[in-house]
Image (cartoon, coloured by chain):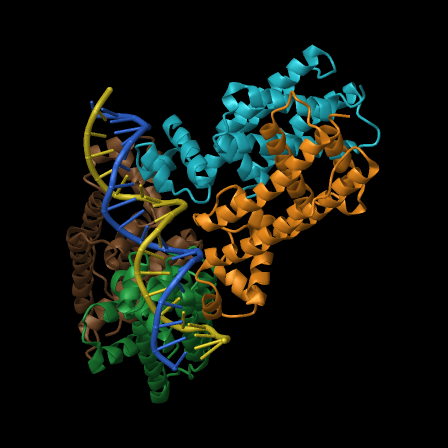
Chain colours: A cyan, B orange, C green, D brown, E blue, F yellow
Amino acid sequence: MRRLSDAGMRVFAERGYHQSRVDDIVRAARTSHGTFYLYFANKEDLLRALAVDCAQEMEALAAAVEPINATEQGFENLRDFLGRFVTTYRRYGVVIRAWMEDQVSDREVDRLGVRAFTHIASALGRRMEESGVPEDVDPTAAVTALMALLERFSYAVSSRDLGFDDDEMLTSLTRLIHRGFFRAAA
Amino acid sequence: MRRLSDAGMRVFAERGYHQSRVDDIVRAARTSHGTFYLYFANKEDLLRALAVDCAQEMEALAAAVEPINATEQGFENLRDFLGRFVTTYRRYGVVIRAWMEDQVSDREVDRLGVRAFTHIASALGRRMEESGVPEDVDPTAAVTALMALLERFSYAVSSRDLGFDDDEMLTSLTRLIHRGFFRAAA
Amino acid sequence: MRRLSDAGMRVFAERGYHQSRVDDIVRAARTSHGTFYLYFANKEDLLRALAVDCAQEMEALAAAVEPINATEQGFENLRDFLGRFVTTYRRYGVVIRAWMEDQVSDREVDRLGVRAFTHIASALGRRMEESGVPEDVDPTAAVTALMALLERFSYAVSSRDLGFDDDEMLTSLTRLIHRGFFRAAA
Amino acid sequence: MRRLSDAGMRVFAERGYHQSRVDDIVRAARTSHGTFYLYFANKEDLLRALAVDCAQEMEALAAAVEPINATEQGFENLRDFLGRFVTTYRRYGVVIRAWMEDQVSDREVDRLGVRAFTHIASALGRRMEESGVPEDVDPTAAVTALMALLERFSYAVSSRDLGFDDDEMLTSLTRLIHRGFFRAAA
DNA sequence: CATGAATGAGTGTTCATTCAT
DNA sequence: AATGAATGAACACTCATTCAT
């Protein structure tokens, strides 16, 4: 079962959810079709299972957001969060994209995605408020923008081989976000 | 042919590229399957045609980016650009997403997308340089982040019914970007 | 479409509904799978279509039942009816059996079968009343028995190669039924 | 093994032979797939085993048919036989139907069915001869009709919830058959 | 004796594409 | 140019059967 969901993640990541054939997954897991349907009701069910895992990690992430203020510590906290977000995204990218664009008819997958992102959005929103958001920016717009930036930037660095690993990029991203969204009041 | 590509855009937008059936498009255009294949080699070819249009508009957009500096005019120029970008995205969203995530095997579609986005990215990058980017931020990271923000925010406001029309959100977005990416040197 | 439903009837008759593969039908009709699904939503839908035809013929049969009394004419009327019933059964046997035993989840097929048989049963019931049923026999039991005899006898003569064609058997059956169910009061 | 064949009978009765999954049977018997194939070569083999039991009971029934003449005792004998037949049918209906319509490729099942029914048919045939069949009815037709009536009527009362238990129906059926098939000479 | 995870051939169904009219 | 009936390769999913434990 683990072999199958791992294979699923790999194959989904490679070809995208809809382009992935059950046969591909089964072959990647070195099992049979029968085994696949022993553990998952259907292809969508596998995505749902992955979505559950992903949502869990995302919500753990949301719960662990430390205060992000103008201090050095605040910067480090943001950096930590961003690093962990990108790492998680690297693993679960396909799932996240599957729920962002609603490629899947299953409402459950959607629900999980919305919930996970809402958790993160509100955690970040709270930190923004604490740090004092500028009054001339609509808070909804700010959170939307931040989430958009987060999600898409993660995609960009995880799909192309931008050398994200050397932390240079993470630091730059942290600076941009820290300045643009959190130190505004400073 | 125009009827077909219009229908294609509508249907793609509604269901996504891969979920769209040639039959849906043909029915939306009130034509026959035969006619479809008279004008397009296959389904992907229609997407390619739409991608050409989209790339054209995007490159026009890139060419028209006015200086974005700390002045009131710079702010207005950015605001103009963002508004036009979101509007274009609203129309061509599916196409753009089809090339961002490479949902399509056709290399041509990819090429068009990369080129269009590169044009915009470099136009913005040049404006950022002019406005004086902070030295502690990697330029590539900054451009990547800005493009990510742009693309995904546009998606967010065009898919959900965030009342983007009242310009409130556009103004907020402009402020965030102006502050975060362009006024850094100020 | 006619070719397909004819082929369907042949194949169903040969192997039974559930044992018939769409592929068998398609091959028998010398067409392709695609064509099958062009005219029928699925395998069950073909059965439903056949059931509609069958029900129609059965109800026509029911409507045409002439008085069955102790006279020579009554005997002839019964004989006519029985002959026509057996003939119809010969053509539609599979369909009828599919609805008698509810081999099919489709409620519509059931409904058609129940309705058709009810029509015949009540037509015959009415004729039995006219001819004066014996008071010591429950009318429901009589009709049930008659329908049972009709249905199963038809099956017996249509499946095995009992030489039913020489009318000998039809005459015998008519005599038995005339005597047992209709001349009781005489 | 007993648990399995009992479960088989129950499941077959509920869903019909072809619609029954080995898994259903195994679950109903609270055993495992492995155990099933320990006792039966395959699904059909279970049906064959049940058919053996059924054929045995049917032949016992055939052997015990008492004279059916115009006397009160003859009537009672017929009534007894019919009651027992219906009871047996109630238990083994699925098996019987499986062999009547040849739903099963196994020739053995067929053979058992034909033999059992032939036994009953000839026992009844002999009784009919004794009671003096009318000369204008073909004996084969008469026996065929009687068997048809028997089989299908039993099915009707065992599947639908016709209140057969109150013996009313059994009495009516007995009267019809006694009159129609056995008292003809009277 | 018993288990149940694993198998894979087989089946229903979809849909992009073709081509005779 | 336009049509739409026909095609068949491709795919998701099922289930009888096996076999290592």
Q: Residue at x 80, y 19 (%)?
A: A186
Which sits in the foreground, C121 or D27?
Answer: D27
Q: Position of residue D67 (x, y in %)?
A: 20, 60
- Residue D23 falls left or right of residue A147: left
Between D48 and C50, the one nearer to me in the picture:
C50
Pinpoint residue C96: horizontal percent, then vertical percent: 36, 66
Residue A89 at x, y percent in the picture: 54, 28
Instruction: From the viewer's perspective, tell me whether residue B149 is left or right of residue D45.
Output: right
Quadrant housing residue D73: bottom left
In the rendered image, residue A137, in percent from the top left (x then y), is placed at: 80, 32
> Taking B11 as reference, is C151 above or below it?
below
Relative placement, left or right, of A172 versus B131 is left
Q: Who's the residue at 42% across and 30% down the image? A: A5
Q: Is residue C141 visible?
A: no
Position of residue D2 relative to residue C184, above or below, is above
Question: In the rendered view, would you say B67 is above or below F9?
Answer: above
Q: Residue at x 30, y 38 (%)?
A: D6
Which residue is at the front of the view, B70 or B160? B70
Residue C107 as seen in the image, left or right of residue B126: left
Asked whether the viewer can see residue B81, the reply is: yes
**Foreground of the two, C114 or C28:** C28
